[in-house]
Amino acid sequence: MPHVLDSITIFNNHLSFAWKEGKRGLVDHKGKVLMDPGYNFIRLTGGRTTETLKFPEWCVYTEENTLEKTLEYDEVTPAGKNLYKVRIGDSEALINEKNELLTEFKPFTIGQVENGRAVFRFKGKYGVFNQAGKTLLNPEYDSILLNANGYQVLMHHNGKTGWHLLDLHGK
């Protein structure tokens, strides 16, 4: 089965770094994967010699103190019930307790999940996604406050900046 990669760099000496979900790998100019994406850092030291840095390994234990699973991220932070915010470099994503990605890795900042919703900041603007990772409000607001019935958003409208109320559907 062919590899599906998020991106690759420009080839240098017939080699290119390959990216998949925020992790680095290495491919040759024919598309052969030489190192599966799974590294935080790869340095070519001459010829085909490499130095690699694996991601820190986070261990999750049950209440009985038995190892349940390991996660490889720079940082793992609880974000809500059975939800975790994970970081690789400057990119964050939201995962569930099964380590399934709910959002893709992006250079954004994710807040706590409250009542099934989380505010995130992307390119200086704020948006909201639900606990399944679906975007509810696109990142186009200067600030967002969550409330039980919807959102208070700070936005520019008709040349003025002010707070506006939006319902749970963003209207």
Image (spheres, grey):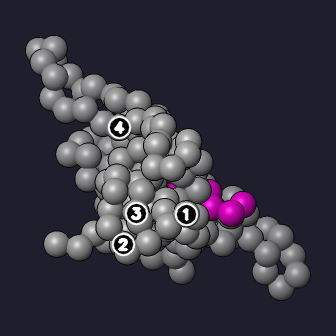
Say whether residue 154 is left or right of residue 24: right
Disc 1 residue type (three-letter)? Asn
Q: Say which of marks 4 and 2 sits in front.
A: 2
Task: From the top left corner, tell me how far across and down residue 25 is, in percent.
Answer: 41, 54
Q: Main secondary structure of the magenta part?
A: strand
Tell which of 125 and 54 is nearer to you.
54
- Say which label, 3 or 1, has the lower sequence index: 1
Q: Is residue 106 visible?
A: yes
- Say which label, 2 or 1, has the lower sequence index: 1
* Residue drawn 33% across the image and 28% down it: 58
* Residue drawn 51% across the image and 50% down it: 47
- Say which label, 4 or 3, has the lower sequence index: 3
Query: Would you place residue 138 above or below residue 99 in this image?
Result: below
Choose top left, top right, bottom left or bottom right for residue 62.
top left
Q: Are marks 3 and 1 in contact (CB under 8 Å)?
A: no
What residue did someone put label 1 on?
13
Disc 3 residue type (three-letter)? Val
Q: CA distance from mark 4 to mark 3?
A: 22 Å
Q: CA distance from mark 4 to mark 1?
A: 30 Å
Q: Does residue 168 belong to the magenta stretch?
A: no
Q: Are marks 2 and 1 in contact (CB under 8 Å)?
A: no
Disc 4 residue type (three-letter)? Glu
Q: CA distance from mark 4 to mark 2?
A: 26 Å
